[in-house]
Amino acid sequence: MDAVRQSDDVTPCDAGDVTAWDATADVVVVGFGAAGSTAAFSAAAAAAEVLVVERTGGPGGAAALAEGIVYLGGGTPIQRACGFEDSLEDMYRYLMAACGPDPDEAKIDRYVEESLGHFDWLVARGVPFDPTFCSETQMAPTGTEGLVYSGGEDAYPFNEIARPAPRGHLAKTKRSTGWLLMQHLANAATEAGAAVWPDTRIDRLVVADGHVVGVQGQRFGETVSLRARRGVVLAAGGFVFNDDMLRKHCPPLVRGTFKVGTEGDDGRGIRMAQAIGAAVRNMYAGEVSLPIIPPRKLIHGILVNGRGQRFINEDTYMGRVGQSALYEQDGDVYLIVDESCYEPNWMGLAASWVCETPAKLESEMGLPPGSLQSTLELYNRHAATGEDPLFHKGRAWVRPLVPPIGAFDLRVGRAPYAPFTLGGLETTVEGSVLDVGGEPIGGLYAAGRTTAGVCSFGYASGLSIGDSTIFGRLVGAAASAAPATS
Amino acid sequence: MDAVRQSDDVTPCDAGDVTAWDATADVVVVGFGAAGSTAAFSAAAAAAEVLVVERTGGPGGAAALAEGIVYLGGGTPIQRACGFEDSLEDMYRYLMAACGPDPDEAKIDRYVEESLGHFDWLVARGVPFDPTFCSETQMAPTGTEGLVYSGGEDAYPFNEIARPAPRGHLAKTKRSTGWLLMQHLANAATEAGAAVWPDTRIDRLVVADGHVVGVQGQRFGETVSLRARRGVVLAAGGFVFNDDMLRKHCPPLVRGTFKVGTEGDDGRGIRMAQAIGAAVRNMYAGEVSLPIIPPRKLIHGILVNGRGQRFINEDTYMGRVGQSALYEQDGDVYLIVDESCYEPNWMGLAASWVCETPAKLESEMGLPPGSLQSTLELYNRHAATGEDPLFHKGRAWVRPLVPPIGAFDLRVGRAPYAPFTLGGLETTVEGSVLDVGGEPIGGLYAAGRTTAGVCSFGYASGLSIGDSTIFGRLVGAAASAAPATS
């Protein structure tokens, strides 16, 4: 038993300094969320001896708290049962456009290639899917429907780039789909033979001659050293709960009020790999959900910034709206509605101002004189013929807004902004962690939000659990097939 | 002489693997630009044995190619001679607002504290300053004037946060002020006793028990190992010439057409430190100059994006305009002018379209119907009384634009966007490089664009040479005072 070091110290430990190994396995998986459970399953299914270490008391991670959407397409049984045609080509084109700028093409290619097989794999793990479609939301429906549009596929510009299809798949349960999904994935890992140590927080890697041979951490106040014969898989989540890392890498997210994840998302998995020279990428990127709908009829309204200007097509994915609102509009945005499209939203957000005229509303909101009036005048002029030449909102959602009109206060601090991080370790498609020179680090693998996945900035709901589980399976297989160190 | 490794390999070398040291000094400085020359000077002036290694044939770095502005204030002799009052408090308030969001307060504090003394230090090194002010530009004047507004201090919102004063100081010469400045700084270093090895490219750090004890690189095709008894100072520039790093960390800059720096700004200094666990920050941040003025009368025009919307006060610093244009407006911007403010600019950029009416102009530019007309109508209505309630452009620049009107095409690819990177290694005020756990790495120091300096995102011209030379002096002193390793 070695001395317990300072809690934020991620400096690697040399294998020669480990006095005794507390446990040994072929593959040690750090984190028992979506990525960790799938990595553990596939390594164990390949007959590797697997030990999963989890800092909380049980499995689940951020995925168990999330909506639980899995982004899959190309014509899954659920898509077909709901009457949607989809192809792998359309899915690929959508992802290349929506996950950019300049997303990881190799990962997207593999993600699409694995998509249909991954749906079957989830079903084989016992995850139930209801073959029904919900049009009202981009999140988990209040019912048990198994399919939603979760990325603005049916809105500009994506509807012109690829044939739209809903690809957000949800396990069959009301609202707690992430929890249900994780029950099945965690069970799959343990049933395949993975051992689990809960309440064990990994703090650093153990290295011999530049090769990762284990991890070291704390369990009930004592240091534990765990040897990995074939590989360590970091699946320890992102860093949205680490304000210091947010300030260094993506300052806009510091202001996010409703962080998506667990307190374990403190970036430790990323930092302990950086401490041995691992490369990171996309650290500025974050998804920010601004949950305006349901009801969908609110999309008839227009979103404006603090200068009364529109900035996005209102019918796109609400995660895109949230990103633009927080990163580009400084969290200073409002939704303008009229009586025919008004209704308090699902969270109880209601209009903060209602006025007889745009001039009055603009004045009460404190917007610059004339700004909202000018925006409304231009919008209404085009809307009279169903057009939106500035932002290309779909015709179904475009009609003039008629006084009296009101405004939802969606400023950061007033409305919930729900962010999580998308940047992390740079990995190969199979999950090897790369060093800053671009070479794989022997014995070190990663998956899930500890890595930079398919998204360089843009996002669709279900891509995080999608790439955690698809690449989790790949990394488990790769680590279990690595040569054993003696 | 050890074997030459692959050129992109920044993996550290263990001191035990060095067969022979080719040279030994107290302090080895990597890079002979603004940061390296000042670090070398102050270390040599403190009686340390100093070796500067430079990958090109001579001194200068990016600073020698730059405008050469040094950001200094608080009442320098030049400011006073030109009739400007300034205080350290105003300079501090301006920097805290302009360098954000959430800039490094400790570094700004020290920068301001050193400002007046640093001016005297430059003069003592022989740098001549002409005590005259140029109002026409935010860059190096065509004349020999020594002072310009270089950060939008006299524009909103900064003019409401701190009393405006010009703080951009220029060495006395026409245009090539960066070159002249670097002549003096390089001479100062060698006259103080620093030895210089040109044509030597450092590739990696040499480490003993986690402590940096030297560097290894190439000289005329052979590996050289250089021992540093007290410390290595990385002053090797930023990474704007490394497209792979730009894609990983700040994708907007990939599109910058006129990169500011030398080909040596490939981020190698950053990566060789990351390879031993050094922390980075602000890697997304980049300065982007969009050189619209002179002539200043163009500020009477309005900048609009591809949807015909204004997005910034046109009288602010052109580097702020460029950042917003490239990062937030996707490089899709135009300057709208009328006859009374029109003139081709200093680079020969001229109006690409001129039309009798806003409707015709909007149509010829391909902007959405009504968009530019609506923007102009609102702008002109307020401009009639000298107001700009949306963006707070100063009254002196606000008057209605009268047809015929024209437009400069400032889209990326048509107009030059001149970027460089602002992110880099995380360092203490004295220049110790921090690891990802927040602890100083023994024997490793850095300054200049290899580090994250006073700017987390926002910028003013002269802050790069300012923080390179101010913190370069501090880091040279710190490294020379470190205990010698045996």
Image (cartoon, coloured by chain):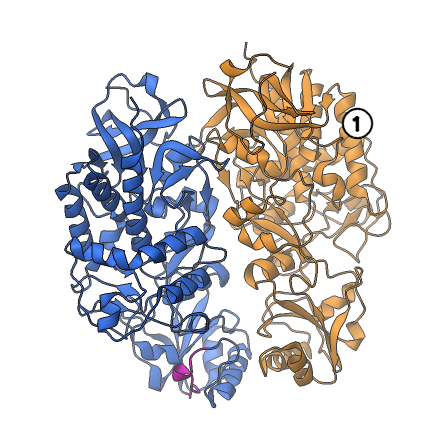
Chain colours: A orange, B blue
Principal secondary structure, stretch drawn in magenta: loop
Q: Residue at x 66, y 36 (%)?
A: A468
Q: What stretch is highlighted in magenta?
A: B393-403
Q: In this view, does A28 lie above or below B448?
A: above
- For the C terminus of chain A, the image quarter is top right
Res B411 seen here: no
Asked whether B471 or A391 is in front, the reply is B471
Residue A291 point in image, percent of width and height: 72, 58
Which residue shows up at 21% across the image and 48% down it?
A: B60
Residue at point 28%, 71% (across, down): B137
- Looking at the rendered structure, the kind of residue marked 1 is Asn
Chain letter of mark 1 equals A
The quadrant of the picture occupied by the N terminus of chain A is: top right
Q: Quadrant of residue B242?
A: top left
Q: Nearer the viewer, residue A152 or B482?
A: B482
Q: Is residue A288 among what the camera can see?
A: yes
- Tell me if A214 is positioned left or right of B468 in this view: right
Q: Where is residue A234 in the image (x, y as percent from the top left)?
A: 60, 29
Q: Does the magenta stretch include residue B34?
A: no
Q: Residue furthest left?
A: B191
Between A346 and A172, the residue placed more toward the observer is A346
Secondary structure under tag 1 reads: helix
The number of discs equals: 1
Question: Label 1, on which residue?
Answer: A187
